[in-house]
Image: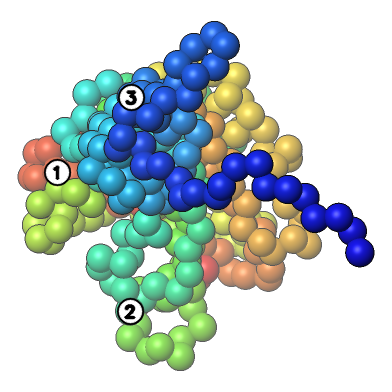
Amino acid sequence: MGKRMRRTRPLCCCVSPRLTTTFLTSRSIFSWYEEDLWTEIAKLLDGKSLVMLAATSKWFHCIMMEDSIWKYACLRDLQVPDPGKVTSKWINLYATAFNGCHSYMFRQQDKHIDWMRIGAFSFDSRNALLTRNLIPSLKFLKEKTTEKMLELNGCCVVRNVKNGIWIADLQLVRCPVCDLNTCDGTMQVLDARHIELFLNEGYQDGSWDYELLGSQNENKKADGASAGIFDVKHLKDCSTSAVLDVKSWVGKSNDWQPKSMITPYAVAINTNLQENEGLCIKFHVMKSGKNGEIVSIRISEQLL
């Protein structure tokens, strides 16, 4: 039988950091309650871990609920630049971005089938190019009406877009022209919204709604259903060129899974299609009131 090791010191329970206990080292004194240290540790944690740590004590709750910590986590996880001033707390913005909510959960839930989070991008300017063609002419004519631009180029420019961070999703919904749950008709929607949209009273009470900008029918076989949203100011950026390099990210002709591409100032989707008779494409926007800023954009595509 092996020799039993002799205990050199008694076992004891952990001492709470509420006491002014410190670890002495040869070079420094470590305090459990060092705000700067825990602020740095917080930068390595996701939202769920931050909430769990905040629940351990009043002291940790005070530190972990600092708006600067949630701002860092939000920008880090969304991979977007600092938008500057926001009107909501960053913990609430983080929640609306990562709690699994999407716009069809609030309205038309009965029409919704499935969805996919694409990611986040930013609007640095007030103008957006909406297109159903991922090879758009960058020399679009600004004096043309929206209807004429859609007719000629399958794209249009919208103004007074709310600056800041936008969340992009790909939605799959049932055919909007019937009420049959057994209907096989489906519609693909590129759905983008400002990160603060869900926190606004006008959205929550239903007073803000989508309005139709225009539509276009493609009365011939379509190889794919594609759509894109671009910040006009950054159309010539290298990152935008990556979106327009369609062959680099869309699937092969026999790949029916939707594909997406997102960059700091643009988002695009493409789904290859089987035999069809064409597409109906519609462009919708939501404003923050009658003459308010555009806070949400939808580009829908339905097989004819």
Residue 113 percent coordinates (x, y)? 45, 74
Q: CA distance from mark 1 to mark 2?
A: 25 Å
Q: Amino acid at mark 3?
A: Glu
Residue assigned mark 3: 35
* Residue occupying image coordinates x 73% and y 52%: 251
Residue assigned mark 2: 110
What label sits on residue 98 in the rendered view?
A: none
Vertical arrangement, residue 62 with respect to residue 100, above or below: above
Q: Residues within 10 Å of mark 2 (few under 14, many from 20)?
A: few
Between circles 3 and 2, the one closer to the viewer is: 3
Helix, strand, or loop for circle 1?
Answer: loop
Q: Amino acid at mark 2?
A: Asp
Nearer to the camera, 22 or 294: 22
Residue 118 percent coordinates (x, y)? 51, 48
| Quadrant of res 109 | bottom left
Q: Residues within 10 Å of mark 1 (few under 14, many from 20)?
A: some
The answer to whether residue 158 of the structure is visible from this angle is no
The answer to whether residue 246 of the structure is visible from this angle is yes
Residue 18 as seen in the image, left or right of residue 32: left
